């Protein structure tokens, strides 16, 4: 019963100016303008999502690359990877 009483308002659509009779007191847009606004919103959101997907597909620097580089450098110096990392972090000093 409360819903029936709340739909006794006459409003004007803020977008097209169409008169709406028997609508809720907080209704701002007519049904056709509401649908148009929803389509515009959906298109904008889809465009933003497409941009996000493009940004996410950029290749990242794989951590394996730096690991492989460290392993190769350790082999070149003739030390183990663990000793190389300790030397690189300045925890030990490699002589030679």
Image: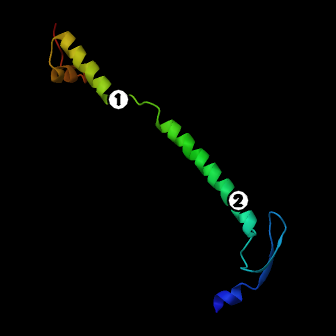
Q: Residue at x 51, y 41 (%)?
A: 53
Q: Which residue position is annotated with label 2?
A: 37
The percent coordinates of residue 81 (x first, y second) are 18, 21
Few, some or many C-alpha atoms within 10 Å of disc 2 (few <14, some 14-19, many ≥20)?
A: some
**Residue 50 left/right relative to 96:** right
**Which of the image's four quarters has the N terminus?**
bottom right
**Mark whose residue sits in front, 1 or 2:** 2
Q: Is residue 36 above or below residue 1?
A: above
Q: Quadrant of the C terminus?
A: top left
Is 90 positioned to the left or the right of 53 in the image? left
Left or right, 24 with reference to 78: right
| Image-quadrant location for residue 3 | bottom right
Instruction: Tell me: residue 60, above or below residue 23.
Output: above
Residue sitting nearer the eye, 78 or 34: 34
Q: Which mark is residue 42?
A: none
Residue 62's tag is 1
Q: Is residue 60 left or right of residue 90?
A: right
Name which quarter of the figure residue 20 lies in: bottom right
Identify the residue shown where x is 19% and y is 13%.
Answer: 75
Q: Are marks 1 and 2 in contact (CB under 8 Å)?
A: no
Q: Sort mark 1 into few (<14), some (14-19) or many (20+) by Cα contacts within 10 Å.
A: few
State the CA–CA distance, disc 1 to disc 2: 43 Å
Q: Position of residue 4 (x, y in %)?
A: 68, 89
Q: Which residue is found at the position 59% from the left and 45% from the top?
A: 48
Place of residue 59 in the rendered image (x, y in percent of width and height, measured from the top left): 43, 30
């Amino acid at each position: 019963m409360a819903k029936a009483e709340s739909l006794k308002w006459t409003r004007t659509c803020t977008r097209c100016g169409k008169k709406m009779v028997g609508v809720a007191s907080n209704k701002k847009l007519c049904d056709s303008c509401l649908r148009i606004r929803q389509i515009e919103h959906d298109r904008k959101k889809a465009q933003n999502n497409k941009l996000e997907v493009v940004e996410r597909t950029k290749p990242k620097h794989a951590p394996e690359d730096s690991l492989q580089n460290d392993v190769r450098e350790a082999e070149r110096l003739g030390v183990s990877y663990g000793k190389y990392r300790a030397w690189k972090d300045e925890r030990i000093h490699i002589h030679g």
